[in-house]
């Protein structure tokens, strides 16, 4: 399984024993592309995006016994990084990845949804399944009334919440996009899920930096002589006495520029919390 996230791609090579009522996990080999970035970093260059996965798929060739490679399924699931790309850039990358795997690797690419951008609701639910499977709350032989764990999944481009609600009445969970019916381990479960696109760690941080820069441009008090000389923007979400170079993206033109932000005298939890509240549109 290739997890193509917004900040990097990772491969999970799993071995399961299928002889019991539930698939029994035996081992996993994990590898990441590290600081090279995710598929979305290669926007406009789909072939380069596909080749960025070679370091991961080569590891799978090394780990999976040669006699089993042709019947070992592989899938690539991309997340919010590709969901946020404009136009056909996301589809172009997915097509290049699928073509590269079929031409260069012996694995069995899933016919349906082999290389896709995962829907946000699936992203959260798969995390919920993973956590509860490992905590042994949803296996086929798990006692019936075993409570399950909620999952808060913080990614780079989006964040998800998933849990299995319990009700004292028979009314149950109302229908809507938040409702997810899951069949797993021989049981049907009703989950609550929601994905907040654009509020993953890296994307939310970008929103904060953009808002801080905008607030600085319209503030009533003129910048100090020092700020004028160094073009420094005060950011309450940075620790006092620290500075950092921040990349700002114009949401209309998508042009990027670099500015210097500093905590100076204004860095504080309370002030940063007010900025976060605006970014999250909590008043709405």
Image (cartoon, rainbow, N blue to C red):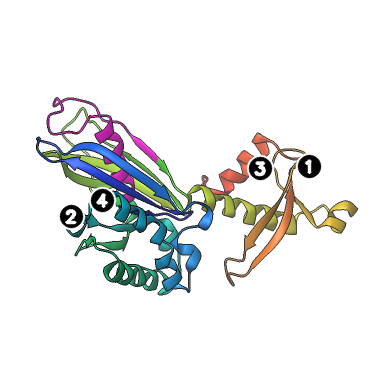
Circle 2: is it few (<14), some (14-19), or many (20+) Cα within 10 Å?
few
The x and y percentages for residue 257 are 68, 65
Query: Which comes sooner in the sequence, label 3 or label 1?
Result: 3
Would you name the residue on which mark 4 appears? 64
Q: Which mark is residue 237?
A: 3
Q: Residues within 10 Å of mark 3 (few under 14, many from 20)?
A: many
Q: Earlier in the sequence, mark 2 or mark 1?
A: 2
Q: CA distance from mark 2 to mark 3?
A: 54 Å
Helix, strand or loop at mark 2:
helix
Which of pointers 2 and 1 indicates the residue nearer the eye? 2
Hey, which quadrant is residue 110 in on the image? Answer: bottom left
Check residue 67 in the rendering and tell me which mark sits there, or answer none. Answer: 2
Q: Is residue 82 magenta?
A: no
Frontmost residue, 62 versus 47 = 62
Q: Earlier in the sequence, mark 1 or mark 4?
A: 4
In what element is the residue under mark 1?
A: loop
Find the distance from the CA under tag 3 to the CA under tag 1: 11 Å
Residue at the image point whose x is 66% and y is 42% from the top: 237
Indicate the quadrant where residue 269 lies. top right
| Viewer-side label of 1, 4 | 4
- Say few, some or many: other residues with alpha carbon within 10 Å of mark 1 (under 14 / 14 to 19 / 20 or more): some
In the rendered structure, which segment of residues is drawn in magenta?
123-152
Disc on res. 125: none
Q: Label 1 to label 4, Cα distance in Å?
A: 53 Å
Residue 143 covered by magenta stretch:
yes
Q: Secondary structure at mark 4?
A: loop
Determine which residue is flagged by label 1. 264
* Residue 105 quadrant: bottom left
Cα–Cα span, label 2 and label 1: 61 Å
Q: CA distance from mark 4 to mark 2?
A: 8 Å
In the image, taking residue 199 as reference, residue 274 lies left or right, namely right
Residue 121 visible, this orientation: no
């Amino acid at each position: 399984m290739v997890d193509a996230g917004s900040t990097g791609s990772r491969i999970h090579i799993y071995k399961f024993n299928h002889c019991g009522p539930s698939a029994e996990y035996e081992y996993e080999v994990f590898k990441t592309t590290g600081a090279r970035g995710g598929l979305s970093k290669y926007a406009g260059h789909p072939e380069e995006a596909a080749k960025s996965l070679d370091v991961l798929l080569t590891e799978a060739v090394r780990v999976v016994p040669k006699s089993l490679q042709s019947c070992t399924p592989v899938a690539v699931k991309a997340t919010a990084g590709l969901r946020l790309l404009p136009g056909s850039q996301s589809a172009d990358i997915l097509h290049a990845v699928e073509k590269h795997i079929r031409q260069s690797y012996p694995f069995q690419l899933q016919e349906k949804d082999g290389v896709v951008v995962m829907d946000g609701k699936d992203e959260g639910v798969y995390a919920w399944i993973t956590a509860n499977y490992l905590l042994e709350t949803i296996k086929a032989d798990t006692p019936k009334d075993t409570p399950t764990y909620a999952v808060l999944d913080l990614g780079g481009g989006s964040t998800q919440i998933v849990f299995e609600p319990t009700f004292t009445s028979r009314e149950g969970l109302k229908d809507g996009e938040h409702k997810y019916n899951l069949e797993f381990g021989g049981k049907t479960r009703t989950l609550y899920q929601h994905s907040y696109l654009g509020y993953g760690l890296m994307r939310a941080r970008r929103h904060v930096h953009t808002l801080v820069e905008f607030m600085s441009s319209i503030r009533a008090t003129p910048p100090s002589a020092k700020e004028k000389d160094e073009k420094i923007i005060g950011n309450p979400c940075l620790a006092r006495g620290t500075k950092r170079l921040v990349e700002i993206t114009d949401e209309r033109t998508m042009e990027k520029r670099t500015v210097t932000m500093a905590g100076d005298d204004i860095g504080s939890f309370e002030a940063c919390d007010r900025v976060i509240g605006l970014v999250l549109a909590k008043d709405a």
